Amino acid sequence: KVQLTPIGTLLYSPGEPLPRPANYPGCRDFPEVAGNYAVCYDFLEFFEAHGGVGQFGYPISNFEIHNGWISQYFQRARFEWHPELPAGERVQVANLGKEFFISQGEDPALLRPVPGDLQSTRAVLSLKAYAFVSPVSLPRNGGEQTLYVKVYDQALRPVEGVEIRYLVTLPGGATYSGTLPPTNADGLSSGTHIIPADVHGRGIITITLTYNQLQGQTATAFQLW
């Protein structure tokens, strides 16, 4: 059976703790694990939009300071808050793979790219995308919401110039579609739309990507209360 390495657990050492929000609606507790840990605010939005427990594992810390950043450790990841970055990019996943590689005393030269045909190594062969919205929760009478999409290639390099279409399916079943600007040099595109009033429930946004002859798809969700 193939299992993901709990690299966050392997590398975690406690940092400077920050106050844990008490009974705050923007937090999610995880009673299934010991430790009284919660994921909150933008970290929670990112966590739920990018695979949740299946991708990152359970939290193994609350907010702490690591390397000068507000951070939170999970079994397989560390989230960092970077306020200097644009909205939609401020939650960053630390490169724990590189940190683990260095911690094992491996040769840093092995991290350098292998010389070869630069054009062929940079060819985009497939598309991988992450999408999320802000805010992720809206009142039943709807409101303004921003959709963010970040696109990578098979080597996790950002892809510029990807065309993006999206389809919004409201909780009541009604749909509408739109487009975002092509992705920029960082592989990012975003746009603001209006979620109309609808019934209480979960809405889905399906995103279709087009780049030359390649296509890809991803999805994200939101909640009307």
Image: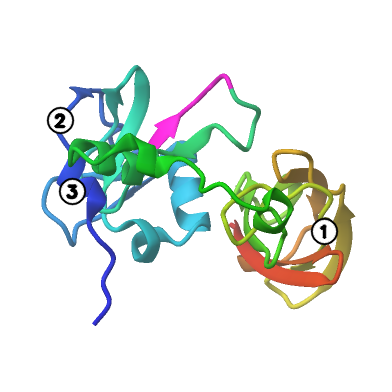
| Relative to 46, residue 168 above or below | below
* 3D distance between C-alphas at marks 2 and 1: 41 Å
* 3D distance between C-alphas at marks 3 and 2: 11 Å
Mark 1, Cα crowd under 10 Å, few <14 / some 14-19 / many 20+, is: many
Q: Is residue 25 visible?
A: no
**Which residue carries the number 2 mark?**
14
Q: How is the image coloured?
A: rainbow
Q: Tell me, yes or no, whether the two marked residues, 3 and 2, touch with CB atoms within 8 Å.
A: no
Residue 69 in the magenta stretch? The answer is no
Mark 2, Cα crowd under 10 Å, few <14 / some 14-19 / many 20+, is: few
* 3D distance between C-alphas at marks 3 and 1: 37 Å
Q: Residue drawn 65% across and 67% down?
A: 218
**Which residue carries the number 3 mark?**
9
- Name the outermost residue toward the bottom: 1
The amino acid type, in three-letter code, at marker 3 is Thr
Q: Residue drawn 22% across and 56% down?
A: 6
Q: Residue drawn 65% across and 51% down?
A: 139
Drawn side of residue 172 relative to residue 20, left or right: right
Corner quadrant of residue 108 = top left
Labelled disc at residue 164: 1
3 or 2: tag closer to the N-terminus: 3
Q: Secondary structure at mark 1?
A: strand
